[in-house]
Image: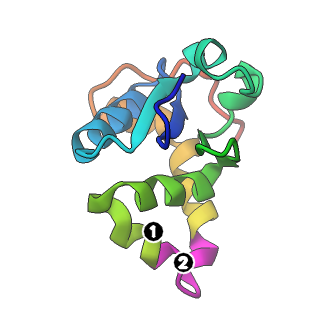
């Protein structure tokens, strides 16, 4: 089970970009406010987790109260939990910027195969979304 009070962050452990991002989050999260969990282990750790096929479609976070958040909104939750990233969550809440969060997230998510290769990581095994 995730630690009490921690934000459970589910990421694709078979995706180079996602795994590298999780490693960066671990380094930035000195206060250990995040529990980074590969989607492939989610059902073992979080009994209320959605099915793996749905988890692989977008990032999911679960707060201590059991509320789930996905996509760009999940990234805003992550940024708000990590002091080094909290300025990003504040900017994401500003008018205009709040409308950009989801489109920017979708752009990055659609291109995670390319981003994995750019980072020299193993490419994502999740099928590339249709263009």
Residue under the image location 53 percent in, 36 percent down = 8
User: Is residue 39 shown above or below 65?
Assistant: above
Residue 37's tag is none
Image mark count:
2
Viewer-proximal residue among 19 and 64: 64
C-alpha separation, residue under disc 2 versus residue under disc 1: 6 Å
Q: Position of residue 105 (x, y in %)?
A: 56, 55
**Residue 84 in the image: above or below residue 36:** below
Q: Nearer the viewer, residue 88 or 119?
A: 88
Question: In what quadrant of the picture does the N terminus appear?
Answer: top right
Judged from the image, the secondary structure of the residue bearing numbered disc 2 is loop
| Label 2–label 1 contact, CB within 8 A | yes
Please name the residue that numbered disc 1 is placed on.
89
Segment tinted magenta in the rendering: 91-100
How many residues crowd around disc 2 within 10 Å: few (fewer than 14), some, or many (20 or more)?
Answer: few
Could you say which quadrant of the image residue 131 lies in?
top right
Using a 10 Å C-alpha cutoff, classify the residue at mark 1 as few (fewer than 14 neighbours), some (14 to 19) or many (20 or more).
many
Residue at 37% x, 19% y is 122
List x then y, in percent, for residue 101. 57, 66
């Amino acid at each position: 089970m995730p630690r009490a009070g921690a934000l459970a962050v589910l990421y694709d452990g078979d995706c180079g970009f996602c795994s590298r991002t999780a490693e960066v989050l671990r380094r930035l999260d000195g206060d250990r406010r995040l529990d980074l969990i590969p989607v492939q282990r989610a059902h073992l750790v979080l009994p209320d987790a959605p099915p793996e096929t749905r988890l692989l479609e977008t990032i999911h976070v679960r707060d201590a109260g059991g509320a789930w958040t996905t996509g760009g909104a999940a990234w805003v939750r992550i940024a708000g939990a990590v002091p080094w990233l909290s300025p990003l969550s504040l900017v994401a809440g500003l008018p205009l910027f709040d409308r950009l969060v989801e489109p920017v997230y979708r752009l990055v998510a659609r291109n995670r195969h390319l981003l994995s290769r750019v980072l020299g990581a193993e490419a994502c095994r999740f099928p590339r979304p249709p263009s």
